Image (cartoon, rainbow, N blue to C red):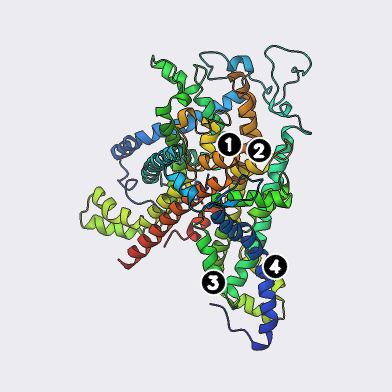
């Protein structure tokens, strides 16, 4: 799923119409009546999340029951780890928690670790590589600059699935299948990141860079000491896009991963889902889903103020 | 744009410039341009991934034109794209108009609607699959039961597949559009509305003649990114509807769409040439949307 720049919490300028209908009690009630369908819609937003959450804390027996309970009657952490489950003896009413489900070292932690390594490497790597290139394209007067930039912009029209098959063949021929390399290296050159950074740099005056050149600083030093700090808000905004996209990446990992060990969280959970369909297994699966969501939500909460800037910079004005 | 560079430093700096561009350009060429050219070539071949590709001319495309499953996939995709983009855009705008204030209630509502955008997408898909469980243990059927209905096999009823996929997409995406629209609304100068009020314009006329036209760039963005994203749908079909390797599109292929079919042909049946042809059809569709977008954008600037 693509992710938008946003500002849920950051204040917006005083709103236009509707909210401006006046301060009277009557009109306030009218306003709420007008919004009634949206309040109901909000309920349909919350209900599935609530369902997910209560599922995580219900034991298998309660999950298989009809009608379902809407408050867990015997809340438990067994869907994460059930100490009473044993691989050797059947213990009715007890199933493996999510951390006991996978036959790999460290169980589900392994996939959390994989996702973390992959997402971090791609985010840091692509921001470094793209900011270097963006600096040259925005601020260096070299031959072919415009052509290169146009080519990169044009490439943003190519859906990445078009290159899926050749890239798979390339990974196979290089012997990279089933490795972090296959996750990370093809994902580093991101055209939209470069485009965004170039736009941002063009809005920054050249004086600082010029002054540094006069002082005898080399280009690499200028990039590291001046350009990167100047780009900070843009890099933060881009990192949110990249982190969310890579954390959720599914189709590419599905194709390049063969072993159990190299799956990222989405592939690992998809496999679990294809093996266990019964309602009593849903607790562990939803626990996995919850664990998959916590890092992105936390990351977003930390960086959310940069979303507003992201919108302002993303070319929406034009 | 770039500053005048003293001549003596120019040569040295050129070398550095290209060196700085190199990592990006090498990766860009190696994993985008070269594969792109390659996939075009492969789309004119028969290729199973093991034996060398054999050139077959336009045969793949001829075959695609008469491939019932592919046509079905295109039809499903069209329905899905129209449904999710139209509904999604309208609801995004509606939500933004309803909840663009700074008060706590509005903030909470915006957070609620945006929540799916920051939740792991695999978690959302698995959640839907569990909500739509075929028996009365699932949430959807429990609600049906409250109203006295019988349990519905949500995921095994072909007529429900596309509507469910559209609802999932709208549910997950409207908060994203809402946020873009809220930002757009915030950038409309308040004076316009004040002037309109002095002229006695009704709320509807203000909306029709001030808000809507000034939100047009946002609308274009929401619609175009929505279209492009919808054409590429894969995960929802694969996780929620596919039932084993040979039924990737769900019951009776009712959820088969372009990218799932590409995956099916390429990685289940190992017809990599044929799958490349499908990939190029997808590319052409998205290319045309992007061109229309450019056209529309330019035309609007000239207006």
**Residue at image mark 4:** A224
Residue occupying the point 49% across, 30% down: B250
Residue A300: image location, x then y, percent? 59, 46
**Label 4 Cα crowd, 10 Å radius (few <14 / some 14-19 / many 20+):** some
> Which chain is home to disc 3?
A
Res B162 seen here = yes
**Residue at image mark 1:** B122
- In which quadrant of the rendered view does residue B30 lie? bottom right
Foreground tag (3 vs 2) = 3
Of the numbered discs 2 and 4, the one sitting upstream in the chain is 4
Foreground tag (3 vs 1) = 3
**Residue at image mark 2:** A265
Residue A267: image location, x then y, percent? 64, 37
| Residues at discs 2 and 1 in contact (Cβ within 8 Å) | yes
Q: Disc 3 to disc 1, how far (Cα)?
A: 39 Å
- Callouts 3 and 1 on one subunit: no
Q: Is residue A114 left or right of residue A69?
A: right
Disc 2 secondary structure class: helix
- Callouts 2 and 1 on one subunit: no
**Label 1 Cα crowd, 10 Å radius (few <14 / some 14-19 / many 20+):** many
Res A229 seen here = no
> Which chain is home to disc 2?
A
Q: Is residue A192 left or right of residue B213?
A: right
| Residues at discs 2 and 4 in contact (Cβ within 8 Å) | no
Disc 1 secondary structure class: helix
> Which chain is home to disc 4?
A
Of the numbered discs 3 and 2, the one sitting upstream in the chain is 3
Disc 3 secondary structure class: helix
Quarter containing the C terminus of chain A: bottom left
């Amino acid at each position: 799923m693509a992710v938008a720049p946003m500002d849920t919490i950051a204040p917006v300028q005083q709103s236009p119409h509707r909210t401006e209908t006046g301060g009277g009690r009557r009109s306030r009630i009218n306003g709420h009546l007008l919004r009634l369908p949206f309040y109901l819609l909000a309920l349909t937003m919350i209900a599935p999340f609530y369902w997910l959450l209560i599922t995580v804390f219900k034991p298998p027996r309660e999950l298989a029951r009809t009608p379902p309970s809407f408050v867990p009657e015997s809340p438990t952490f067994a869907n994460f780890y059930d100490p009473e489950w044993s691989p050797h003896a059947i213990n009715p009413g007890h199933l493996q928690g999510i951390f006991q489900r996978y036959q790999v070292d460290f169980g589900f932690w392994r996939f959390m670790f994989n996702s973390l390594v992959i997402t971090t490497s791609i985010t840091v790597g692509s921001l470094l590589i793209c900011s270097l290139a963006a600096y040259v394209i925005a601020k260096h007067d070299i031959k072919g600059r415009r052509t290169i930039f146009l080519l990169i912009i044009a490439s943003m029209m190519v859906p990445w699935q078009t290159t899926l098959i050749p890239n798979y063949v390339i990974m196979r021929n290089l012997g990279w299948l089933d490795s972090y390399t296959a996750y990370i290296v093809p994902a580093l050159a991101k055209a939209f990141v470069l485009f965004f950074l170039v736009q941002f740099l063009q809005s920054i005056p050249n004086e600082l860079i010029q002054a540094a050149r006069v002082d005898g600083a080399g280009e690499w030093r200028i990039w590291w000491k001046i350009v990167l700090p100047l780009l900070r808000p843009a890099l933060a905004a881009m990192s949110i896009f990249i982190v969310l996209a890579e954390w959720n990446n599914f189709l590419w990992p599905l194709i390049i991963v063969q072993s159990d060990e190299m799956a990222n969280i989405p592939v690992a959970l998809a496999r679990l889902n294809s093996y266990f369909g019964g309602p009593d297994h849903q607790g562990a699966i939803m626990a996995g889903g919850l664990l998959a969501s916590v890092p992105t939500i936390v990351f977003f909460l930390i960086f959310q103020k940069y979303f507003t800037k992201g919108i302002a910079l993303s070319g929406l004005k034009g | 744009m770039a500053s005048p560079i003293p001549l003596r430093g120019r040569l040295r700096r050129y070398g550095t410039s290209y060196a700085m561009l190199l990592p990006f350009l090498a990766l860009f060429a190696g994993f985008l341009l070269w594969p792109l050219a390659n996939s075009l070539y492969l789309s004119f071949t028969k290729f199973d991934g093991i034996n060398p590709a054999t050139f077959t001319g336009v045969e793949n495309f001829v075959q695609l034109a008469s491939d019932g499953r592919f046509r079905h996939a295109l039809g499903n995709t069209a329905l899905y794209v129209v449904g999710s983009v139209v509904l999604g855009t309208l609801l995004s705008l509606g939500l933004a108009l309803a909840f663009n204030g700074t008060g706590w209630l509005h903030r909470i509502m915006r957070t609620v609607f945006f929540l799916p955008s920051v939740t792991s997408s695999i978690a959302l898909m698995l959640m839907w699959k569990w909500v739509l469980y075929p028996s009365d243990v699932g949430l959807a059927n429990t609600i049906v039961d409250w109203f006295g209905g019988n349990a519905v096999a949500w995921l095994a009823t072909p007529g429900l597949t596309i509507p469910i996929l559209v609802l999932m997409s709208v549910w997950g995406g409207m908060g994203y559009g809402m946020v873009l629209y809220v930002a757009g609304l915030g950038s409309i100068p308040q004076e316009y509305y004040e002037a309109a009020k002095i002229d006695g314009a009704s709320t509807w006329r203000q909306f029709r003649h001030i808000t809507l036209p000034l939100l047009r760039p946002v609308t274009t963005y929401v619609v175009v990114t929505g279209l492009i994203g919808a054409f590429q749908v894969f995960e929802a079909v694969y996780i929620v509807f596919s039932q084993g390797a040979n039924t990737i599109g769900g019951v009776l292929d009712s959820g088969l769409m372009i990218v799932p079919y590409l995956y099916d042909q390429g990685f289940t049946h190992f017809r990599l040439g044929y799958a490349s042809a499908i990939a190029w059809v997808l590319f052409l569709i998205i290319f045309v949307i992007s061109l229309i977008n450019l056209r529309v954008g330019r035309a609007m600037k000239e207006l």
